Amino acid sequence: MGFNCVRLTWPTYLATNATLSSLPLRWSLERLGLRESAAGVRVNNPGLLDLPLIYVFREVVSALANNGIMVILDNQITTPGWCCSRTDGNTFFGDKYFDPEEWLKGLSAMATMFRNTKNVVGMSLRNELRGPYQNVSLWYRYMQQGAEAVHAANPNVLVILSGLDFDNTLSFLSPNKVELSFTGKLVFEQHWYGFSDGTDWENWNQNDACGVAVQSIRTKGLFLLQQGWPLFFSEIGFDMSGTHTADNRYLTCFLSVAAEMDLDWAVWALQGSYYIREGILAYDETYGLLSWDWSTARNPSFIKRVNSLQSPSQGPGQPNSQKPYSVIFHPLSGLCVLVKSANSLKLGPCDESNAWNYTSTSELVLKHTGQCLEAKSVGDTAKLGAGCSKSCSKWQLISNSSMHVSTELTKNGTRVCLDAGPDGAITTNQCKCLSQDPSCNPESQWFKVILSSRSIPAEASVLQLPSLGPWPAASSSPL
């Protein structure tokens, strides 16, 4: 499915409680009445069945390494079980099952255990701090101690700090920074689900809901990127059935932010089902990437949509010689605007995208050609003009989502927006769903003009234009 890392959860007691860590997998399953599950392990992974749980955990990490998959070890909870609620005793330092000293001991033990395991690249200190015990001063005290404990045990691993309110907010970091003895390996993590925004996605116009949600996550955590700190959206997720309207709307908004800011992110969750969850056998994980029987992708269209976001567009790994350029990203499809000819623009893979320049005068210019994106009439296909001039269309990003790429027609002043049809063809239609109506779906007209430093395929950097006649002798050679 194109993912390169697993955020692998573990309970503190797995590292600190010898009774739990030494329990054979077979006994762990059978004591819960899961004899069928034990039989399944016997068929598929017989070598694991009689190993202690901590060794089974290590085998999982090893199997991921053998398949080229990185691992982030995530301390999810203290006591084994389902997470998370405000009353489960695992909410914050000092809660019933959350002894800070035990937690520090567990972090040190786990960091030490995987000190020489190259595919373990990060350790997340605690998932979703929450509940009535939340306290900012204690957060600084213990998270700094936890970071130092991990660093002392494993100086090569990234240290990942979560926020408060179920990891929805890191806003308290705005005035006061974390003080540590090391640099260059600190990462912050933030969570964002559709339900994080209350009922906005159901009850508001979609542009308004997206605009408010993005401003909220910017205030709560995204500001850290502008300050130069790495930020990891360690949990995003939605109902993979595709029938949950609010989740579908949230997802398209998230993908636009992820593309614009070149975010690192992880989907909750991989599993299609559980041995047992909250007392229910074979519980179906509707947010799971995999189907209930783990045999296929639950939502193949989602895998296609995120494909273009699974490799960096601006960050490390890009050629240093490549100057940033713009691409026009369509979050509903996960595709980008490609120029097929001067009279044909169509959605296609973003790694085949043309390079655009969104100028200070609001023109969309195809780089290396000087050709501009133009709108001629309502319902017409979007076209490239023969050359930038006063007649070139001026494209503004309108609506509260800032994703309607809009211009006024020179003939009559009608405002039109870029629109992607079911076949991927790009037309200029009247702008829709800009405000008010909560039932209107604007996503075919949602585009993001984003920066990229990826290498441009040769065929995407040159456009064959209609003949303009012979070139003057003093002119440069044609592109």
Image (cartoon, grey):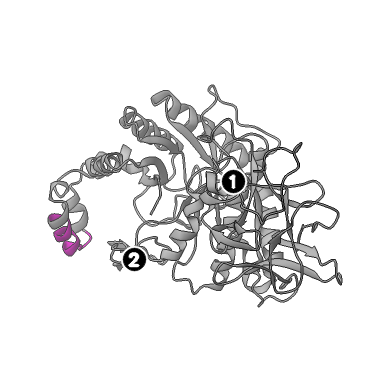
Residue 380 in view (yes/no):
yes
* Residue 16: x %, y % from top left: 32, 37
- The residue depicted at 42 percent of the width and 33 percent of the height is 104
Identify the magenta region: 32-42
Determine which residue is flagged by label 1: 461
Q: Amino acid at mark 1?
A: Ser
Image quadrant in which the N terminus is located:
bottom left
Q: Is residue 197 magenta?
A: no
Residue farthest to the top, as pictured = 181
Amino acid residing under circle 2:
Ser
Residue toward you, 79 or 322: 322
Give the spatial CA distance, label 1 vs label 2.
40 Å
The residue at the point 60 percent across, 47 percent down is 462
Image position, residue 299 (x, y; %)? 41, 66
Q: Secondary structure at mark 1?
A: helix
Q: Earlier in the sequence, mark 1 or mark 2?
A: 2
Question: Does residue 33 show up magenta in the picture?
Answer: yes
Looking at the rendered structure, the number of numbered marks drawn on it comes to 2
Horizontal side, residue 82 vs residue 146: left or right = left
